[in-house]
């Protein structure tokens, strides 16, 4: 249901001072407050020690009607973590490099006025929240939330190798240099994993990604069946062997998923192609992974250090996100979910018993 303007309504702006033009943002917020009839917003600045979780919790405790996350993917992830188990909706004001959740929800990326209009007058869409329980090499554990993806391997190494100053100057293109560095690491991982209540399995892999969303910048559709509100993770394992294997992976995710899948003719062509063993998909609500040695771990494009084990679980509809008032809500039918999980079980059966 669309938000109804009221003088008693108030927003909180949780902003990353490094990512936003604060004077311009304050001016734009004041204009939309006036036009929408809202009270003066609560302004909360993030910090290195707290990138948005504590600020979002404080805003919810003060009874605001919406929390606006103004920053990159890290700010959005942290704010969502702070709003867990509350009814306060989250609005996105994309100001970073990836803007992964905003892209997957098809929200405005470079239009401040449009983003603020959605924040103040849009409607709410319930989306799933991922929870990652990780174990460090020293035996310590911690729990973090995520909205887009969690991963080990190439993706995590790419994040760890990325240069923040280069990202600031060049945007997403800066990751090309990080990918070049990550691809120098030819070590494959030996992992044990368990999907939901299935038996433990083992595999050798280069990268494992657990996704709540599927799209990346550059027209890359990594997880084509992922939906933000289906109560399930989409999981992919990349297992390329040498240069030819990487070419197969690239053709699959960029050409087939990113181009062919978007048209009826393209989908027919895809139906005639066979799956490649270098890319395997799974789907489930709980995914446990044990590593044979410590690996870099990432959440929503941020580096979260080294882990030796992680478990991801999903909380269906745990976060409400603001979308444009005139946007229709997507819906995944129960029979579609059952069919997708059946396909996942077939892929799971191909893995080695642990």
Image (cartoon, rainbow, N blue to C red):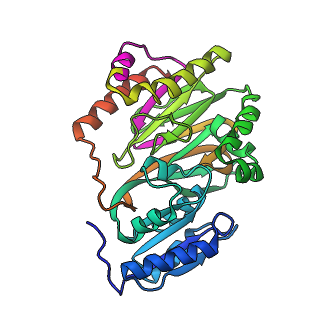
Q: Is residue 136 magenta?
A: no
Q: Quadrant of residue 238?
A: top right
Q: How many numbered dots are placed on residues in this image?
A: 0
Residue at left 62%, top 51%? 97
**Residue sitting nearer the eye, 206 or 20:** 20
Question: Which residue is pictured at 57% across the width and 72% down the height?
Answer: 25
Relative to 102, 338 lies left or right: left
> Does the image show residue 205?
yes
Q: Position of residue 235 (x, y in %)?
A: 47, 36
Is 281 a magenta residue? yes
Front-lying residue, 335 or 28: 28
Q: Position of residue 241 (x, y in %)?
A: 64, 17
In the figure, 315 relative to 183: above or below?
Answer: below
Residue 295 seen in render = no
The residue positioned 42% from the left and 33% from the top of the image is: 224
Q: Position of residue 274 (x, y in %)?
A: 42, 13
Say which quadrant the N terminus sits in.
Answer: bottom left
What residue appears at the point 59 percent right and 70 percent down from the top-left corner?
A: 15
Can you say whether 25 is above or below 141 in the image? below
Q: Is residue 81 above or below residue 283?
A: below
Quarter residue 26 falls in = bottom right
Q: Which residues are magenta?
A: 266-287
Relative to 254, residue 288 above or below: below
* Residue 191 place in picture, x, y as percent: 60, 31
């Amino acid at each position: 249901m669309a938000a109804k303007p009221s003088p008693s309504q108030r927003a909180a702006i949780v902003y990353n001072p490094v990512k936003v033009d604060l004077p311009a943002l304050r001016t734009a917020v004041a204009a939309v407050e006036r036009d929408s009839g809202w009270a003066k917003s609560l302004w909360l600045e993030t910090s290195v020690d707290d990138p948005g979780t504590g600020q979002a919790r404080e805003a919810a405790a003060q009874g605001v009607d919406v929390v606006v996350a103004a920053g990159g993917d890290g700010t959005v992830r942290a704010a969502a973590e702070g709003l867990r188990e509350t009814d306060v909706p989250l609005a996105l004001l994309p100001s970073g490099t990836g803007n992964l959740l905003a892209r997957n929800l098809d929200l405005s990326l470079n239009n401040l006025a449009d983003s603020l209009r959605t924040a103040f007058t849009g409607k709410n869409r319930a989306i799933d929240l991922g929870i990652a329980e990780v174990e460090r090499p020293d035996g310590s554990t911690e729990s973090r939330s995520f909205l887009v993806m969690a991963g080990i391997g190439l993706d995590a190494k790419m994040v760890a190798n990325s240069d923040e100053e280069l990202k600031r100057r060049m945007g997403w293109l800066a990751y090309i240099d990080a990918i070049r560095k990550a691809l120098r690491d030819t070590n494959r991982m030996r992992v044990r994993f368990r999907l939901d209540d299935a038996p433990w399995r083992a595999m050798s892999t280069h990268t494992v990604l657990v996704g709540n969303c599927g799209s990346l910048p550059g027209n890359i559709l990594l997880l084509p069946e992922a939906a933000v509100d289906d109560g399930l993770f989409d999981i992919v394992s990349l297992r390329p062997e040498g240069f030819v294997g990487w070419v197969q992976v690239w053709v699959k995710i960029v050409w087939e998923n990113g181009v062919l899948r978007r048209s009826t003719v393209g989908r027919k062509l895809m139906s005639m192609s066979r799956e490649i063993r270098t890319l395997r998909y799974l789907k489930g609500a709980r995914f446990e992974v044990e590593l044979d040695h410590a690996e870099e771990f990432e959440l929503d494009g941020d580096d979260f250090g080294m882990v030796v084990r992680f478990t991801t679980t999903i909380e269906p509809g745990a976060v409400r996100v603001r979308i444009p008032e005139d946007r229709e809500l997507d819906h995944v039918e129960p029979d579609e979910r059952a069919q997708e999980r059946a396909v996942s079980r077939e892929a799971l059966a191909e893995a080695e018993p642990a």
